[in-house]
Amino acid sequence: MATLAGTTIAGLCCLGAALPAKAAVVANYEFQNTLSSTILTAPDLVPFVLGTYAPAVIGGTPTTVYNFGQNEGLSLDTTGLISDNYTIAALFSFNNISNYRKILDFKNLTKDRGLYTFEGQLNFFDAAIGGPAVGPGTFLEAVLTRDSSTKLVSAYFDGNLVFSFTDSSSDGVISVDNLLNIFQDDADVGGESSSGSVAGIRIFDNVLTDAEVADLDLITPSVPPTSQVPGPLPLLGVGAAFGWSRRLRSRLRRSTPTV
């Protein structure tokens, strides 16, 4: 079990696994001291109250996380990103897991429906609940998918399917204002949010398979500062060195860190 500021992380699977080639990623937030997406066509996340960044170690990997206060979550304008067919993945921890704690709100904070933790378990209120219970301060990877053709909503805890239900009421469809609110409680029933930390959020415009969800890796390793500047390469060796460097980067991307 890795340690993050005195807390632990539960069962993250397949760290370092390659992103599925057919996955259509439309937004990717790594929280490396920015709320911008690594995909430049996606808008920035907008904080209700600006949080702070801090170093952390998740699954043995040094990274940076974004810390937010209670009801000081994030909002995303999903215009042009997703509609009623999507996958949303988040790697986060809550400091308070008692009762309901909202993760994803689809109705611009006007309704109590949405994805929560309830006593540490994943819960889509009020349709389904399942999976193991996570403790306070413990990182978990929550993934929610919705298939527009079948209206099937599925939730995953650390890569494992924990429940599915038919969303006949379209509770998992973002309302016409196109705002997805994250870690922010609605105005219908107050007090159901928690402070916490987030290490990654990734959004796809299609439904990932069980295997693709299990292969997700939302941790971005911190890059230590370079301590030495290498000397100039001999002219005849530049081409060979460039080719070696590309192969090395490719190997590093395919490597799997130890959990």
Image (tube, grey):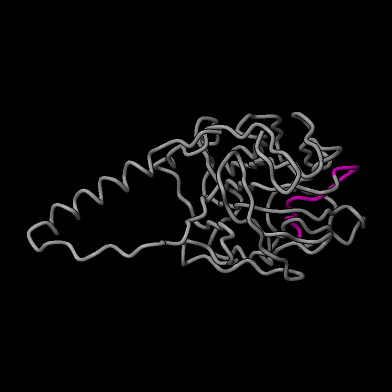
> Residue 31, can we see it?
yes
Q: Is residue 98 magenta?
A: yes
Quarter occupied by the C terminus: top right
Question: In the image, what residue occupies the spot 44% across and 42% down?
Answer: 19
Question: In the image, what residue occupies the spot 67% across and 34% down?
Answer: 157
Question: In the image, what residue occupies the spot 76% across and 69% down?
Answer: 48
Residue closer to the observer: 202 or 82: 202
Task: Residue 61: give x, y in percent of width and height.
Answer: 55, 44
Residue closer to the observer: 176 or 43: 43
**Quadrant housing residue 72:** bottom right
Figure check: 115 above or below 175: above
**Quadrant housing residue 71:** bottom right
Task: Residue 211: give x, y in percent of width and height.
Answer: 51, 30
Task: Residue 133: give x, y in percent of width and height.
Answer: 79, 32
Q: Is residue 131 magenta?
A: no
**Quadrant housing residue 207:** top right
Quarter occupied by the N terminus: top right
Boundaries of the magenta span: 97-107
